[in-house]
Amino acid sequence: MPRNAAQTEIYDALGVGFGPSNLALAIALSEQPERLRTRYLERTRQFGWHRDMLIDDATMQVSFLKDLVTPRNPVSRHSFVAYLHQARRFHSFVNQKTLFPTRIEFHKYLEWAASDFEHLVRYGQTVTEIGAWQDQGAVTAWAVTATGPDGELSTTLTRNLVVATGLTPSLPAGVRTSRRIWHSSSFLSNLRDWQPPDRPRIAVIGAGQSAAEITAHLYKQHEAAEIYSVYSRYGYTQSDDSPYANQVFDPQAVDDFYYADQQTKQSLYRYHANTNYSAVDQDLIEELYRRQYSDTVSGRERLRVVNLAKISQVREIGDKVRIELSSPHLDGPLDVDLAIFATGYRPMDTDGILAPVLSHCDLGEDGRPLIGRDYRIATRPHVTAAIYLQGGTEASHGISSSLLSNTATRAGEIADSLTRTGRAATTLPVSVPQE
């Protein structure tokens, strides 16, 4: 942290994290008439988005028209259609008569778009601290400290901070990952290194899309495997992607949720949770059911469902994983060679990374920051710097607020808000940051 220099450089906006959300923001800001000085800090060494779930033939659950830009700017040069044109696959893609590209192809599109902004991104940077930069009692900027790949520390000053650190893998209480216990977020990497026994027994725990995709992939790729699909429900639940239900992902739905009273918000969340959480595409459900039925016909049951299951303990015993559970369809514990938990993610944790500056924010009755419609955290009168959230806003903005469906629109709204604050001077007097 510089203390003796008269001035230090400051950015207009700094993004923490550079996944699809802040990539969409970078594109939106690049299309604004007024250019802001921006920088992005990303923990990983290269751009990526759920790389370990890029399963062959797995398709997007979101139309390609809901890419990084099209809902906001249909003529953007960073659209999925523009990518197809550049890759000389436009007509071939159209001939498939689908709105849903494979996840692998959509990831290639994201990488293609991200390559235009490499000069703005510092990869391999883990943000360790955010402090308030004060000048005569006013918080005029944020000081963001990060650790680089070789352990070196750096501090960046910014008038506006946009936090998009992504989701955190969720595991049941007491469960820890190991060589034989995985979370779906590391599925393909772990699978490449796994040395299975001749006839492996694998448990896939979870009832959502990821669990179903992993189960189907393992069934196809490991013909000698016996796979147990373990979940607390009676069966996989179909995701509701009907036209009226899908309106919950429209930009207008964010307004409807944000301005609703608390009781209405709870009702909306409860009614439409099955559009996104613990739900599976109908065609994948039917595929798994056909495979399970075919097993019963052939007399070799490779895919077994352990439903209505309540797991009490997971532990490794020798070279096995013992899953203690209660289920009407299984007597005693389940011993497997590998346990994969497709148990979802926790929303972006803003309290942790922002804890040192929360004293400068307006908090609600639950102790969490109040968030404006433009995703900006409400701050105290002495604060002129701003913090925006791309994630962790489900309670205030609804289910769709942090999903890919709304990424382009949300990025545009934040870009507009950033531009309205006006471009700051590129230098600030140096003072000691204070919490």
Image (cartoon, helix red, strand yellow):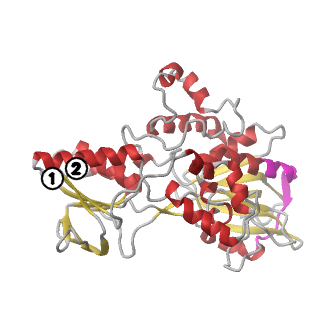
Does 142 lie within the magenta span? no
Classed neighbour count for the residue bearing mark 1: other residues with Cα under 10 Å, few (<14), some (14–19), many (≥20): some
Residue at image coords 64%, 47%? 407
Q: Are marks 1 and 2 in contact (CB under 8 Å)?
A: yes
Q: What amino acid does circle 1 point to?
A: Glu
In the structure shown, which secondary structural element does the residue marked by tag 1 occupy? loop
Total numbered circles: 2
Does 422 lie within the magenta span? yes
Residue at image coords 83%, 37%? 33
Q: Quadrant of residue 208?
A: bottom left
Residue at image coords 83%, 48%? 419
Name the residue tied to disc 1: 301
Q: Quadrant of residue 398?
A: bottom right
Residue 325 position in % (x across, y down): 26, 74
Span of residues in magenta: 416-435
- The residues tagged by marks 1 and 2 sit, at their Cα atoms, a distance apart of 7 Å
